[in-house]
Image: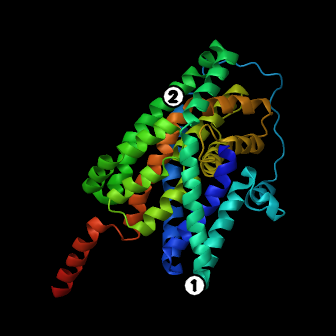
Amino acid sequence: MLYTVIVPLIFFSVANAIVNIGELKRLRKILMTMMGTFLFTGSIAAIFMIGVVILFPPTQGVVLKLTQTATMQSINIGEQITNMLTVPDLTKLFLPDNMLALIFVAILVGVATTMTGEKGKPFADFLQAGAEIFMKLITLIMYYAPIGFFAFFAVLVAKLGPTLFESYFRSTIIYYAAGVVYFIGGFTFFAFLANKKTGIQTFWKNVTAPAMTALATCSSAASIPVNLQAVRNMHVSSEINETVIPLGTILHKQGSILGGVLKIAFLFGIFHMHFLTPFALCSTWLVAILVGTVMGAIPSGGMLGEMLILSVYGFPPQALFIIATISIIIDPLATVLNVVGNTVSALLITRFVNWFELEKEPRMKLRVAQRNE
């Protein structure tokens, strides 16, 4: 059901966020700053986790028996990118497999609606109503999502038995330890960049609610309302808040990037491939960022990102089960990192576009004083 609802939710929320900005010049500035910030924080997350898996190989002492060995397949990168960003016809646009294309179309719809002006206001109201309706629907579904999550995990444990913990215990410890370190150290660093000591205090004062919501629901989408309120309490302007949080929920997932690096390193180890090569390290950085982009904001999601990993490196279909299992195990903390990563990114973006209300007045006074001198 979540896969059914998440597609229209993404379309309406992204298009509505673009319309809410209003001026195209402001929209361009926010979007460019947002994408640059997402790339910066995502790169930091990927590099951090690459260092972790180099120091602590996740497959050390792990033996998994597969019915088929890995064979590298020739992959046309240009074709892969084209398939990710485009669809042959409109009917395929609203499929979960084409989520990136849907996001780009939603952005274009929002821009076109803004350019239309008053004539486009009825459609803008429709987009806003659609976003609110599907957010409410997500909230209703999420009341029962934890039951389904734990039921699915219980079935998985019953099928795999001790193998689950014997084979993935080391990877679980590595991810959760690295995730906690990144949550405390990485997000504190980003908050410091946003507004130094004040940014750190503001961030940690308001981060508890979105973090706890993400941990309880294992859903980035379900955490959007709480995250919006938390960022609002940080004195971030509504234009940035209502754009960064919905778009970040879809496009920016630092927890998923950490998980993507772990999955790639795990598969490299299982199939006895060399990870410490320039190609492997650079491609891991790139693929992990893509994984953090295409993964859906749903509990235990990530099938799209996992298929991307398999297709890029040519792993056999059996490998999908391995990384899907890792996704389920790391999902709670990954969701927390995904959600809170957007919280602190809103502070960074506000800093970069000079709309941080806590600093606007002191800056103006400083400029006046400098002119008087």
Pointer 1: what residue?
117
Q: Is residue 276 above or below residue 15?
A: above
Q: Which mark is residue 174?
A: 2
* Residue placed most toward the observer, 176 or 189: 176
Q: Measuring from the top left, give residue 315's x and y in whole percent.
A: 77, 35
Mark 2 and mark 1: span between their CA atoms?
52 Å
The answer to which image quadrant residue 299 occupies is top right
Position in image of residue 361 (x %, y %): 24, 73
Label 2 with label 1: CB-CB less than 8 Å: no
Q: Secondary structure at mark 1?
A: helix
Give the residue drawn at x 22%, y 71%.
362
Q: Quadrant of residue 114?
A: bottom right
Q: Residues within 10 Å of mark 2 (few under 14, many from 20)?
A: some
The kind of residue tagged 2 is Ile
Q: Residues within 10 Å of mark 1 (few under 14, many from 20)?
A: few
Whole-percent x, y for residue 170 in the image: 55, 22
Q: Residue at x 47, y 63 (%)?
A: 242
- As drawn, is 23 to the left or to the right of 111? left
The disc, 2 or 1, on the residue closer to the chain's N-terminal end is: 1
Question: Where 145 falls versus 130 (above or below)?
Answer: above
Query: Which mark lies nearer to you, 2 or 1?
Result: 1
Image quadrant in which the C terminus is located: bottom left
Amino acid at pointer 1: Gly
The picture places residue 178, in percent across and down from the top left corner, at 46, 34
Numbered circle sitting on residue 319: none
Q: Is residue 252 visible?
A: no
Write the residue at 27% across / 67% down: 359
User: Is any atom of residue 243 visible in this view?
Assistant: yes
